[in-house]
Image (cartoon, coloured by chain):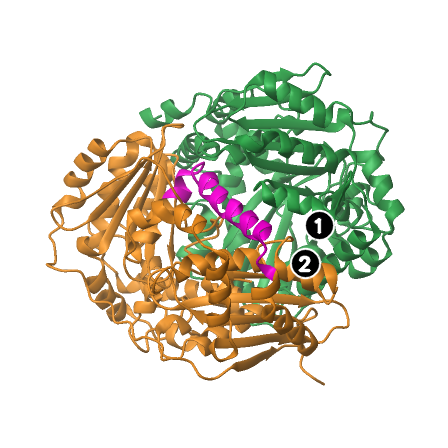
Chain colours: A orange, B green
């Protein structure tokens, strides 16, 4: 369901899990030119994950140039003076490495996974394309066509993705999260070399980057290699400014529908405007995180039990919260109606269930179960060096601290029943919401 | 060969074969860095064994195993899993019903007990059956007009017409509606048997403790009864193109030709050849010609499919309706070139370097290791396969590649299915 909020990969690849974690024995430092560095040791196999994150994403696209962050991410593979288009990929591949890149609302990231002794080579190439990208006119057209095909594949042929886009556009009235990461079709068509170059010069600087290295390597070695590669890039003096207009206090409950003849199974979704871990006052984001798990995390959640198990009005139901965001973000409740149940009847049932959260959903067993699952996920994530690299990279990219990531399980454990009730009562209310229907056109 | 490749060509992990007191066999990787245990298991027998008029039974069975077992009804069973953060899932494909279990070490006893119940004592309560049935039908309807799903469905229907592999593994809304509890019970009896399972376990548990747990879970499963025989099959309709009409701006394309099975000695050369043509790196010929040079598509590639009784090479791409013919021509050209000229020596070497060097990258998490080992066991390739595999890749010659190309591309005819509204096809 979460199609609109997933980062876009440069090419198909496995997706990763949640973005919170805990505890490895990591270290962090900053190079003289301002590049932040995080080192996460994982000595089990002689492999490293090398990632560079930039603190800019689709939400930093200039007006009228939606999709430029993502388009530039594609163009970053098109060569520098020293290394012509495709050479980096050939080298990675020849070394038995794997690579990809992705763009999200708040960040853009590039990564390679290679044998430990090839780390320096990766740093040389990655540092080179931080400032020396050529962007020859001849590569712009074909790559723009690739992105247009990507949009056709993800959105233009999929009514549920169209609903997700329309709901975000409706939920975020003022801030840029309402614009699709990949950009609108008619704006992608007009993106050109000048747009890409301007954007590149503004954001691809050492001060704006975060280097994350996870794997069979220590802090000293990473520092030495990073100094010899990234460290040679001249600083720009300061980090680029991110212009992020805030959302006004919402007043209107909104309903929207995507009606398409291809839809054989109707569904409904509800988005609520809620604070993120960056914008929340006090500890609301931890409460919302736990609330999503209690009411919508799997077959023992409150929504599933009420709507699917007890009333059989839905065949599936759940909730999720996108905590990792710089600005106010989204909390989603979704349900798939049982045969013969109208979306209106289902929505009514969802509303009845949501109203009873404070009184009925928050028994201590349910809260304990949700906490156990969330905390266990942080332990499970330590089994994967790429997951850890993603967790810390994305946190720093939205200006969270390492300490905040490490403290996450403790904060989740500290959430009380009253916090959950209060979060539900304050945030899951009509005027903060957009409800979306996916259905066939009414004949 | 570069130094890096040498380093990574040794076995990517240390696997021990373990046999429990009751004779349950498993492959075991002991690692105590992370306090978890990952289990992967595969039972022989899957959707190909569905009753001919009721495709979808094996998949529905897989979905019902964790919906109530022993003394626990569905909700109670799910609550026990969730309360201990135990992750248990089952899936069914053409030839096998598999599953995976992940647990924190401290909940291992509970996790293995729940797995035992799910395998040995599933309840198939009627309310759970109806719920899963409704979910399955909703899922089928949700995807019914997705161009990728439509193209794939038609590809198998026509490419393996009259064979069990031609039936939809998830069934159809109509066939799922007709599945009865008896169908599920019968399928469970024929698949979930001791002699049919391959098991791999990775994580913070010693061999003795593991043996005892495996005995509990698998040691008392019933003996196997014979499964229906799935006749060997090969891809039909080579040389034909089918359009599935759908009003979308972009067409999804599936194309297929002969394959070479994983168990076949010719597999590794075919694997290298596939990597050069359309494997998963940005350097493949199709990625370069279709995407990088011409901007025809976001995704394009090929892969080898290896079933018990059939194999094929198939590919995918998606391009706007107006450029479908151009994309198909470029793909056919590349295959013709590869057949007549073969790869350059450098191209072959680079492909081998990549496949050798990247093998270890698949062994970086416990779950991935367990999954890979169970698959290797299921294919009957031997516990030494992961140590031998890079040597096999390294030994592939131009002559091996030519032989593989002849077997796979043959006379160059493909079976192509296009879902969309392509112009000029």
Residue B126 x/y as whole percent? 84, 52
Q: Residue at x 52, y 44 (%)?
A: A372
Residue labelled with disc 1: B75
In the rendered image, the vertical position of residue A365 relative to residue A270, given as above or below:
above
Outermost top residue: B21
Q: Are marks 1 and 2 in contact (CB under 8 Å)?
A: yes
Residue A6, visible in the rendered structure: no
Magenta span includes A305 = no
Residue labelled with disc 2: A305
| The quadrant where residue B184 appears | top right
Residue B98 x/y as whole percent? 68, 37
Dot 1: within a 10 Å radius of its alpha carbon, few (fewer than 14), some, or many (20 or more) residues? some
A341 sits left or right of A402 in the view: right
B83 sits left or right of A22 in the view: right
Identify the chain of the residue marked 2, using the numbered disc in the image: A
Dot 2: within a 10 Å radius of its alpha carbon, few (fewer than 14), some, or many (20 or more) residues? many
In the rendered image, the vertical position of residue A300 relative to residue B28, given as above or below:
below
**Front-most of A367 and A180?**
A367
The stretch in magenta equals A361-388
Query: Looking at the figure, which quarter contains the C terminus of chain B?
Result: bottom right
- Magenta segment main secondary structure: helix
Whole-angstrom CA distance, mark 1 to mark 2, is 8 Å
């Amino acid at each position: 369901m979460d199609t609109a909020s997933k980062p876009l990969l440069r090419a198909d690849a496995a997706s990763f899990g949640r973005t919170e974690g805990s505890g490895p024995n990591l270290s962090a430092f900053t190079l003289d030119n301002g590049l932040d560095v995080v080192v996460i040791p994982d000595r089990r196999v002689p492999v490293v994950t090398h990632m560079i994150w930039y603190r800019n994403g689709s939400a930093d696209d200039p007006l009228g140039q939606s999709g430029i962050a993502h388009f530039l991410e594609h163009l970053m593979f098109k060569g520098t003076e020293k290394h012509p288009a495709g050479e980096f990929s050939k080298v990675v591949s020849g070394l038995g490495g794997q690579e990809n890149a992705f763009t999200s609302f708040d960040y853009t990231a590039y990564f390679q996974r290679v044998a430990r002794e090839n780390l320096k080579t990766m740093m040389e190439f990655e540092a080179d394309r931080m400032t020396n990208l050529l962007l020859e006119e001849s590569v712009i057209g074909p790559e723009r066509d690739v992105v247009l095909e990507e949009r056709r594949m993800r959105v233009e042929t999929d009514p549920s993705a169209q609903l997700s886009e329309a709901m975000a556009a409706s939920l975020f009235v003022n801030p840029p999260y309402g614009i699709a990461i990949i950009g609108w079709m008619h704006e992608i068509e007009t993106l050109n070399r000048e747009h890409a170059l301007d954007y590149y010069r503004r954001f691809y600087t050492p001060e704006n980057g975060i280097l994350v290295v996870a794997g069979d390597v220590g802090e000293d070695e990473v520092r030495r290699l990073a100094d010899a590669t990234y460290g040679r890039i001249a600083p720009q003096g300061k980090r680029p400014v991110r212009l992020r207009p805030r959302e006004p206090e919402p007043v209107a409950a909104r309903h929207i529908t995507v009606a398409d003849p291809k839809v054989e199974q109707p569904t409904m979704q509800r988005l609520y405007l809620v604070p993120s871990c960056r914008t929340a006052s006090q500890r609301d984001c931890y409460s919302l995180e736990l609330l999503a798990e209690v009411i919508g995390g799997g077959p023992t959640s409150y929504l599933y039990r009420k709507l699917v198990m007890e009333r059989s009005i839905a065949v599936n139901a759940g909730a999720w919260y996108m905590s990792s965001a710089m600005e106010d973000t989204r909390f989603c409740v979704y349900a798939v109606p049982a045969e013969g149940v109208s979306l209106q009847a289902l929505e009514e049932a969802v509303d009845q269930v949501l109203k009873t959260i404070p009184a009925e959903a928050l028994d201590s067993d349910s809260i304990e179960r949700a906490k156990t699952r969330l905390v266990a996920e942080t332990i499970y994530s330590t089994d994967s060096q790429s997951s850890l690299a993603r967790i810390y990279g994305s946190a720093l990219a939205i200006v969270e601290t390492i300490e905040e990531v490490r403290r996450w399980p403790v904060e989740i454990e500290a959430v009380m029943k009253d916090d959950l009730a209060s979060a539900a009562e304050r945030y899951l209310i009509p005027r903060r919401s957009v409800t979306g229907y996916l259905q066939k056109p009414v004949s | 060969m570069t130094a890096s490749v040498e380093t990574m060509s040794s076995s990517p992990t240390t696997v021990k074969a373990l046999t429990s007191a009751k004779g349950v066999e498993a492959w075991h990787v002991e690692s105590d860095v992370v306090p978890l245990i990952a289990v992967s298991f595969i039972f022989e027998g899957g959707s190909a064994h569905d009753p001919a008029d009721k495709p979808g039974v094996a998949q529905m069975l897989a979905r019902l195993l964790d919906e109530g077992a022993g003394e626990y009804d569905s909700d109670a069973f799910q609550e026990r899993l969730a309360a201990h953060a135990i992750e248990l899932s089952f899936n069914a494909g053409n030839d096998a019903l598999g599953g995976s279990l992940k647990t924190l070490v401290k909940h291992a006893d509970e996790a293995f007990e729940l797995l035992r119940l799910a395998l040995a004592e599933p309840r198939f309560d009627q309310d759970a059956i109806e719920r899963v049935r409704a979910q399955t039908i909703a899922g089928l309807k949700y995807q019914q007009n997705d161009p990728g799903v439509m193209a794939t469905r038609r590809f198998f229907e026509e490419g393996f017409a009259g064979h069990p592999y031609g039936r939809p593994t998830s069934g159809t809304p109509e066939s799922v509606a007709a599945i009865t509890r008896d169908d599920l019970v019968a399928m469970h009896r024929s698949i979930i048997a001791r002699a049919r399972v391959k098991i791999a376990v990775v994580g913070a548990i010693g061999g003795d403790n593991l043996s005892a747990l495996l005995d509990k879970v698998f040691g008392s499963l019933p003996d196997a009864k014979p499964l229906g025989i799935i006749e060997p099959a090969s891809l039909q309709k080579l040389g034909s193109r089918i359009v599935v009409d759908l009003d979308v701006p972009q067409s999804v394309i599936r194309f297929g030709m002969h394959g070479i099975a994983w168990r076949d000695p010719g597999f590794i050369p075919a694997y290298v050849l596939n990597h050069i043509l359309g494997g998963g790196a940005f350097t493949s010929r199709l990625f370069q010609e279709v995407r990088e040079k011409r901007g025809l598509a976001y995704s394009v590639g090929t892969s080898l499919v290896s079933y018990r009784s059939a194999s094929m090479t198939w590919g995918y791409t998606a391009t706007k309706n107006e450029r479908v013919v151009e994309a198909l021509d470029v793909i056919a050209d590349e295959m013709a070139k590869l057949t007549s000229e073969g790869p350059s020596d450098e191209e072959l070497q680079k492909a081998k370097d990549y496949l050798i060097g990247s093998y270890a990258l698949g062994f970086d998490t416990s779950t991935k290791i367990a999954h890979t080992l169970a698959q290797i066991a299921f294919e009957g390739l031997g516990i030494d396969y992961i140590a031998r595999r890079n040597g096999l890749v390294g030994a592939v010659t131009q002559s091996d590649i030519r032989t593989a190309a002849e077997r796979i591309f043959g006379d160059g005819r493909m079976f192509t299915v296009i879902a969309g509204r392509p112009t000029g096809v």
